[in-house]
Image (cartoon, rainbow, N blue to C red):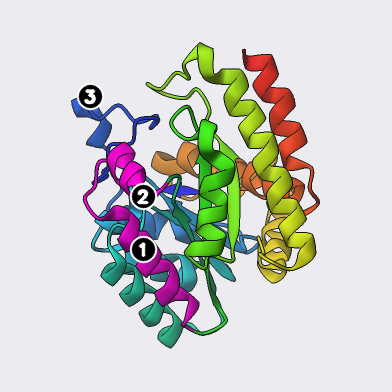
Amino acid sequence: MHFITNRCNARCSFCFIDFDNENTFKGELSLEEISKLTKSYPKSLLNVNLTGGEPFVRKDIQEIAKLYIENTSIQSIYITTNASLPERIEKFANNIYKKYPHIEQTFQISIDDFPEKHNSVRKIKDLFDNCLKSFKVLKNLPEKINPVVSITVTHENCDNIESIYDFFVDECGIDSIKCTIVHDEGVFETPKIKKQQILDAYSKLTQKINNDIKKGKIKNYNSKIMVIFLGSSFFIFLTILDVGKYVKFKLISEVIFFIIIANLIYAIAGFFTLFGLRSKVERILYRRSR
């Protein structure tokens, strides 16, 4: 997982980033630094998750992806996005596919509520429409390009989460959905009065998603991509104790180690999701944090 920027054009009510801190936007890696970073990786790296902030505010995101593809052995790219910039997303997907057709691309699009509420919570005009546009554009691209909508269950939507999900599936035609639960991170703290409601809503939503996956109504992770995630993390785990010999640039060694650990955790979370265990684990951790 690579946080390529902390910059973002949204201001979500539950975001962990401190946008009022001037230091938040310092230290963004340049293309030259990312080139050094990617060249230092072992050949066991099979997937990278580009995230932020909003990764598509970086106009050089294609160049970043190319550095990972050309300097490492990745087979897939996973990008988390608020999908506010559909033209950039479509251009990225098409250009990467044309030059590297073997690379699996997954775009996780964040949509959490009905249109007006979603726009209001994330503070971007017409955001919902752009999210839906991005999803449908990506769905019509080659098979190697996979969009998935991610719903974050928060204090803002927990009271209507099942209706929101039904609206996405039945009215908007979204057939690839996953979900997560908001966590206390950075500057965000969940309102205590809402914690149980959030947990209950998350439990109901994960059950609905699991049931609809079994019925074939929706899908979640592309099984090929999940194998890549798990395989990548298995080999990365084997190299963690010996990561030093792969690190040629001392300046960024700590960043490399963090990204390796994050990728391992991310794939484990995907493993739990794939086998219907993630919601159980998160419910246990959520209760302990209360």
Can I make out residue 76 in this image? Answer: yes
Q: Which residue is mark 3?
A: 21
Where does residue 2 sit, x and y in percent of width and height? Answer: 45, 49
Q: Which residue is mark 2?
A: 4
Identify whether 162 is placed above or below 172.
above
Pair 3/1: label in front: 3
Residue 47, picture quadrant: bottom right
> Do tag 1 and tag 2 residues touch (Cβ < 8 Å)?
yes
| Neighbourhood count class around disc 1 (C-alpha, 10 Å): few under 14, some 14–19, many 20 upward | some
Circle 3: element type: loop
Task: Give residue 259's mark.
Answer: none
Provide the residue span drawn in magenta. 114-141
| Quarter in which the C terminus is drawn | top right
Q: What residue is rendered at 46% in x and 65% in y?
A: 68
Q: Which residue is mark 1?
A: 64
Identify whether 59 is placed above or below 244.
below
Where does residue 29 sit, x and y in percent of width and height? Answer: 31, 48
Question: Who comes first in sequence, dot 3 or dot 1?
Answer: 3
